[in-house]
């Protein structure tokens, strides 16, 4: 009986030791992969120039949830020192500027809160989130109307303003944006060629409306903040350090 107990104890110790070794090895391997992924991401961001695409984060796009979320492509709009400005290549989702009818600005709208909380935490891995810079987002006055734009904000994810989209997109054709299958299935408008309407943060004709880019790539300024036809095209500054 004592020999059997001793034998069982030895086996338990061996199994326990093997489990500890396996845990150590698996953690080491995971760290190696994580280090490699971070290095690869840094190289990709450093090498990216205006007009290139970089891949960061995942989001449902093909509307086939059984095959998992798809990597997000981001168009590089600007490159300054050790940072780049990017915007999603495609409109990712149907979204309201504000969840309820109200007088709002970018500063107070529910979309801003959702982007900088739910979206950023669900879309990006921690190492990717570390790349997203906190940025001063200016409350630009619309060149079309004198609707009060609210106050400047500090955000990590944001929408472009009219002034910014004019700076970074030279033509209406460049402003046109395709909606993903998921985005369209959720309810966003798109024309026969797949082009959608995407939100800007600049206020519209009054304080119940926001500006947007329509399917022809033209700026419009009467998007009701509570309407459900508009799509999301987030932007952010990424560190290349």
Image (cartoon, rainbow, N blue to C red):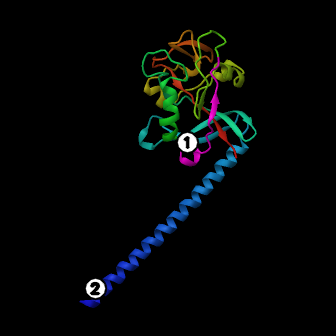
Closer to the camera in the image, 181 or 233 = 233
On the image, the x and y values in percent for residue 138 come to 64, 24
- Local crowd at mark 1 within 10 Å, few (<14), some, or many (≥20)? some
Q: Tell whether position 132 is magenta.
A: yes
Instruction: Calculate the distance from the C-alpha at mark 2 to the C-alpha at mark 1.
Output: 53 Å
Tell me which segment is drawn in magenta.
Answer: 124-140
What is the tally of numbered marks visible in this picture?
Answer: 2
Give the numbered dot on residue 5: 2
Give the side of residue 11 with respect to residue 110, left or right: left
**Quarter-of-image position of residue 171:** top right
Outermost residue to the front: 151
Q: Is residue 26 above or below residue 80?
A: below
Outermost residue to the right: 81
The reply to whether callout 2 and callout 1 are in contact (CB within 8 Å) is no
Outermost residue to the left: 1
On the image, the x and y values in percent for residue 236 come to 62, 34
Looking at marks 2 and 1 on the same chain, the residue that comes earlier in the sequence is marked by 2
Q: Mark 1 points at which residue?
A: 57
Please indicate, yes or no, whether residue 213 appears anywhere in the rendered image: no
Give the side of residue 11 with respect to residue 131, left or right: left
Q: Mark 2 vs mark 1: give the one in front.
A: 2
Q: In this view, does 114 lie above or below 38?
A: above
Q: Is residue 37 above or below residue 62?
A: below
SS for dot 2: helix
Q: In this view, does 63 lie above or below 97?
A: below
Q: Tell whether position 182 is magenta.
A: no
Residue at the location (52% across, 38% down)? Answer: 120
Please indicate, yes or no, whether residue 235 appears anywhere in the rendered image: yes
Closer to the camera in the image, 184 or 32 = 32
């Amino acid at each position: 009986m004592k020999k059997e107990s001793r034998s069982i104890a030895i086996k338990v110790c061996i199994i326990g030791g093997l489990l500890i070794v396996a845990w150590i090895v698996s953690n080491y391997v995971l760290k190696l992969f994580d280090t490699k992924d971070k290095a690869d991401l840094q190289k990709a961001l450093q090498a990216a120039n205006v007009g290139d695409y970089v891949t960061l984060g995942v989001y449902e796009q093909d509307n086939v949830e059984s095959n998992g979320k798809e990597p997000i492509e981001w168009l590089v709009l600007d490159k300054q020192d050790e940072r780049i400005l990017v915007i999603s290549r495609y409109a990712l989702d149907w979204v309201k500027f504000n969840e309820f009818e109200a007088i709002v600005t970018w500063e107070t709208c529910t979309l801003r809160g959702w982007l900088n909380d739910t979206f950023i935490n669900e879309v990006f891995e921690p190492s990717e989130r570390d790349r997203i810079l906190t940025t001063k987002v200016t409350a630009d006055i619309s060149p079309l109307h004198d609707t009060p734009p609210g106050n400047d904000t500090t955000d990590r994810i944001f929408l472009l303003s009219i002034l910014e989209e004019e700076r970074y997109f030279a033509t209406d054709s460049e402003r046109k944006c395709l909606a993903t299958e998921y985005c369209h299935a959720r309810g966003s408008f798109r024309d026969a060629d797949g082009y959608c309407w995407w939100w800007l943060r600049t206020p519209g004709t009054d304080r119940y409306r926001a500006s947007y880019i329509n399917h022809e790539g033209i700026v419009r300024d009467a998007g009701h903040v509570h309407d459900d036809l508009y799509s999301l095209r987030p932007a952010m500054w990424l560190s290349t350090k």
